[in-house]
Image (spheres, rainbow, N blue to C red):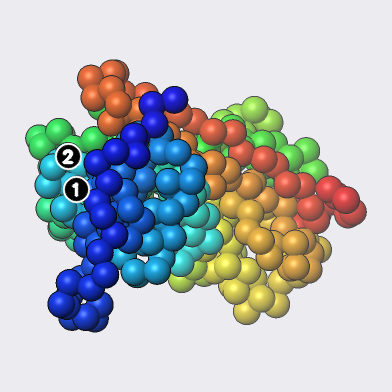
Amino acid sequence: MDYVPAADRLPAKQGDGLGETDRMTTMVDVARRAGVSVATVSHVLNETRPVRPDTRAAVLAAIDELGYTHNTLARSLVTARTRSIGLAVSAISNPYFTEILQGVEAGALEAGYSLLIADPHDDPAHEQKVVRLLHERRVDGMIVAPSAEPAGMAGYLTRRKVPAVFLDRLVGDAHDQVCAENTAPVRQLVEHLADLGHTRIGLVAGLPGLSTTTERVQGYREGLRARGLPFAPELLAGGNSEAEGAQDATRHLLAAPEPPTAIITANNAMTIGTLRALRDLGLDVPRDIALACFDDFSWADLFAPRLTAISQPSKEIGAAAVRLLLERLEEPDRPPRTLRLPCTYVHRESCGCTGAGR
Ligand code: HPA
């Protein structure tokens, strides 16, 4: 082990004419209190070299006694790294994105990075602004869930060679990206409902322009084709990825001359809107209409009936985004990668199966 020698210790000094509250405690103060060199304090704080356990303990005790706070900004001026990651994710209050954030936070913390978080509100202009602001704070890299019109934001990052990872929504293949499988799981929901005898299956789809929307609609079409059912445009309604849009879309679907007997909602927010519309219309799930959802959420099993849902690996998506970003920081020139993580089918009762998944 390459221990820091005990030589070059600063002598402990009692008082320097300044009261402890009169000025900021410095690394020199810590070194004096612990009876070690400033370099040793620095190695303990920055984990740049192994330090003997007893010396380390003395330094940590001195830090605690003096109430010293490490100034990482000063270090950043030397290293040109801030050990911070910028995270731009819309709809942070949506449990899906909250869990992604938890995954990012845990991964970042483990690697010694802190997070700066911004919400672009799925607005392309706002997205460009927050990405620029994060970059101006000199984050070492960025993780972004792109909006439906991400070209401006992606161009900014590319031109400035900012290490970046996109998550959830894919944007070409010029950047590292991570998302869940979207097509196969929706196809599976359609096939299941068709196998239960439904021939009129509606889809409440997300915001146009998001890759998640395109892929889930593709899964819907594939499922219909696999079961020999025709694609009926009037059964595909746009819910704009949010509850209100889905409520309107569901009312629209059910006002059709030949309404669907089963509905698939393409995300958790839209599931809420669809459930509201069904309740307002006095329709019972699954007796009057079957329901299957993309996105599970922690209270989906409290609904009566419990919701049959596709569960996304949200925390894993967040953790994988951090891993991809750290790899990119290590190896800036490696080719971009896209990771797709599998979803889990959570079979409950809203599809019409009784006692399913127990
Ligand atoms: N993408 C993927 N899954 C989701 C989203 C989204 O924007 N919103 C809720 N679940």
Element under disc 2: helix
Left or right: where does residue 257 sit relative to residue 214? right
Q: Residue furthest left?
A: 159
Residue 239 is at least partly visible in this image: no
Disc 1 + disc 2, Cβ < 8 Å = yes
Identify which residue is drawn at 13% across, 42% down: 78
Q: How many marks?
A: 2
Q: Who is closer to the viewer here, 310 or 331?
A: 331
**Which residue has dot 2 on it?**
79
Left or right: where does residue 76 sit relative to residue 218? left
- Res. 190 image quadrant: top right
**Which residue has dot 1 on it?**
75
Element under disc 1: helix
Looking at the picture, which amino acid does disc 2 mark?
A: Thr
Residue 319 is at least partly visible in this image: yes
Left or right: where does residue 225 sit relative to residue 116? right
Q: Who is closer to the viewer here, 226 or 232?
A: 226
Identify which residue is drawn at 59% across, 72% down: 277
Compared with 320, 134 (above or below) is below
